[in-house]
Amino acid sequence: MLRLHSPLRGWCARLDETPDEVFAQRLLGDGVAIDPTGDTLYAPCDGEIVSVATSRHAVALRAENGAEILLHVGIDTVALGGQGFQALVQAGERVKRGQPLLKFDLDVLARGAKSLITPILITNGDQFSVAEACVGMSVEVGDALLNVVSAASQADSASGAAGQEETLSFAVPLEHGIHARPAALIANFAKAQNHEITVSSHGRQANARSAVSLMSLGVKHGDEVALVASGAGARAVLEQLKALVLGIHEAPHAPDAVQAAAPSVSSAPKGGAAHASDRSDTVDATAVTNRLRGVIASRGLAVGRAVTLKDAEIAVVEAGRGIAHESAEFERARDEVRVRLNQLAQHSQGAAKEVITAHLEFIDDWELVACARRAISRGKSAAFAWRRAVRDSADTLRALGDPRMSERVDDLIDLESQVLLALSGEAPVTIPSLPERSILVAEDLKPSQLVSLDATKLAGICLAAGGPTSHVAILAAAMGVPALVALGPAVNAIADGAWLVLDAEQGTLSISPDQIALAAAEQTLAQRRQRQQSERAAAHVDCRTADGQRIEVFANLASIAEAQVAVTHGAEGCGLLRTEFLFLDRDSPPSEDEQLHQYQSIAGALDGRPLVVRTLDIGGDKPIPYLPLPAEENPALGLRGVRTSLWRPDLLRVQLRAILRVQPTDQCRVLLPMIADPAEIRAVRRMLDEVRRELSLSTQVQVGAMIETPSSAVIAARIVREVDFLSIGTNDLTQYTLAMDRGHAELAHRIDGLHPAVLHLISMTVNAADEHDKLVAVCGGLASEPAAVAILIGLGVRELSVVPTLVPQLKSLIRTLTLESCQSLAQRALAMDTAEAVRALANEAMTPAALA
């Protein structure tokens, strides 16, 4: 038996009272916690220093009998970066009981740390256990603290005993680290497991079931994390979680942030003539009297009157009215907010639904709720407890110095106010009614406020604070509402009703412009609207080039709502239905009937137009919890697309049955992703024939193959013999051709589908299909780029599948082109050396109408 002596002077408490669930739940080990009144940490026994944290807030010591002891001064003190700490020992040094290990400044810690309480833990609990701990009493340095006894019955690691601890470490490949979405995915996975999972990085730990705790680790791209779990099957669970993290896809955020100078108000000469270029759609600011510069969050131009929003701080009372009363009120308020969020989620889609889903995750966040409940148990009011829990987590995220994490604070503060309002019995703060052409002006805006607005009356958004990757920015872009953020405090002085010109192309806000500038902005806006109306009016007519070549313009879809938008914008069908939306964010795969219902609803929304259904494209960047893929060094080169479906033929068979049951039977076509060779197509066709016989169907379904790799383009002549059509996925084709990860931040500007190498592969594919009189479509991102359309047509592409809202613009562009000019442009593009040269050529060849 080993006796540990108190390393601190202070009050000794049980670990359960530690305001951090990792320690309170003994995820790092058993022990005690001391709330210190002294400023020096001493060795609790003789031993060897195993490690001293880089930030000097923690020391690990190995005793003579092998017990490993962690002394962790304060909670979340790692965020101080060593400030207030002085290390007196170093790793490898032998120490005696009572020898000073660390000195610390209590005032610095009290101001900057979550708590001063210091856990004293036995971290190798498989070999040792804690006995006779002195808790609930004052201790002096050197007092008997606890006994450490051998726990041999738990140490049989070779036999795989139930208490065995498993650790799995790896580097996080996510471009933006573990931010809100990955944290939510990890937490959802962990909640479904029977094992307690700890995630460690940077000397800090988080319970995997808490998204907030995970975000507070501050894990960035390339950082090492360690997953820890104990018990039978722990290794398999950790492998599944690792596969989930490695497979999370990070799409770049849409808005391009303007690196603006510090926000300022400037003056310009009055009465100067303003000129709006027909080709650029931007506003000349020389005639503007007051102008602020900000960061673009959502592009566009808006002219309207200011509607100012002032958000008052919600007052809370610290003292509670009894633990039972406050606990009941806390649960009632959370239930009320949860119900409201679920109702909003049912009527939302896209970015708005993602925001609401994040709030639903936070309302039940394991750490937030536990912290609030602990405060309530100490006599605090539910409102005070909730605010303290949220603000502590928000402060931790801010302290990371990561802009993306700081912007997630907006969501926490938003949720804080929703629960506080529910506790007070007040309705959520919303903007009651917007006049026409309102430009919302505020210090900041909560996502829940934005989703509650009437978007038809909202012309623009101007915020003093905020960031270009915040949820408000994402929502504004999804709503098509121009928005500027980080305009500075001068925004708060704008008078209600003042005329504003918001130019979210140039990053400027003009306040009370003179009549000439206002008229110029109105004229530019009217020209843009007129052009859009003209394009929309002609969008439902079949699309042909100026010399009569038929070009079909389809839409890429992922929901019923998107199908409805596509039809209203003139799409001639769906060239790519991403069926992954049915398989993600759930614990089990969708049934045949569930899939049929969704496919039939989308087919109905298309009103007989063709529906190309891509089979499940899971693997690599889109893992799902109930389909644990084998661990892979590079998931993008492993089980992906049709390879995953053939690996799990049970899922493929159910999906094919659902597709073939859609009525009318000839509306649907099947598209196979990530085809590498003809054998894969033949395997799926055999299954299709079996399903047709099972369903007694005589009608043949059209089958297409996606060309997404250089290899499939090279042997397109063989692949096309096995299918009815080909569809080129330019996103993957580009990254595999250029050997550049499309999620890599440093390479993003170089991953261009107009690279001559990619264009040559497209040309090879089209030529192979022409020999067999088969159609070639392009459904990747390149099809939605106006600069690429003429080149693709010139290469022989006759079907484009694009973003639904771009259909009118692209049809309008195609009608200005001739097949001969497109073919000439394509041949010149093939002769270029770089993507930049091709783009310059394409832009030069485009007509003024196309540029506008």
Image (tube, rainbow, N blue to C red):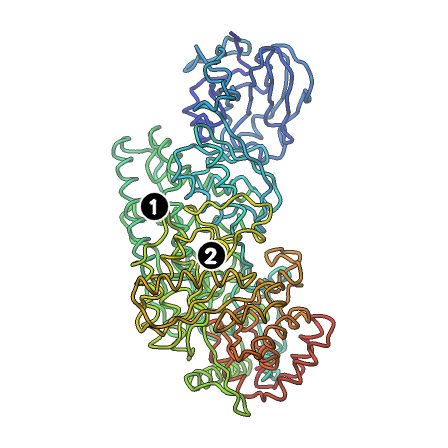
Image height check: is 53 above or below 9? below
Q: Answer above or below: position of 106 versus 395.
A: above
Task: Out of 644 and 199, give the one closest to the viewer.
Answer: 644
Residue 235: % across, % down: 49, 33
Amino acid type at image mark 2: His
Measuring from the top left, give residue 349's x and y in whole percent: 38, 62
Q: Is residue 442 above or below residue 87?
A: below
Position of 285 with respect to 352 (left or right) is right
The one nearer the camera, 676 or 735, is 676
Q: Amino acid at mark 1?
A: Leu
The residue drawn where x is 60% and y is 82% is 279
Q: Earlier in the sequence, mark 2 or mark 1?
A: 1
Residue 465: give x, y in percent of width and height. 52, 56
Q: Which residue is mark 2?
A: 471
Residue 107 sits in quarter = top right
Query: Does residue 274 appear anywhere in the picture?
Result: no
Label 2 element class: helix
Question: Which of 603 and 446 lies nearest the eye of the viewer?
Answer: 603
Q: Is residue 358 left or right of residue 696?
A: right
**Would you say 381 lies left or right of 847 here?**
left
- Residue ID at (43%, 13%): 137
Q: Which residue is mark 1?
A: 420
- Residue, x 56% and y 30% (percent of image)? 109
| Viewer-side label of 2, 1 | 2
Disc 2 to disc 1, C-alpha distance: 21 Å
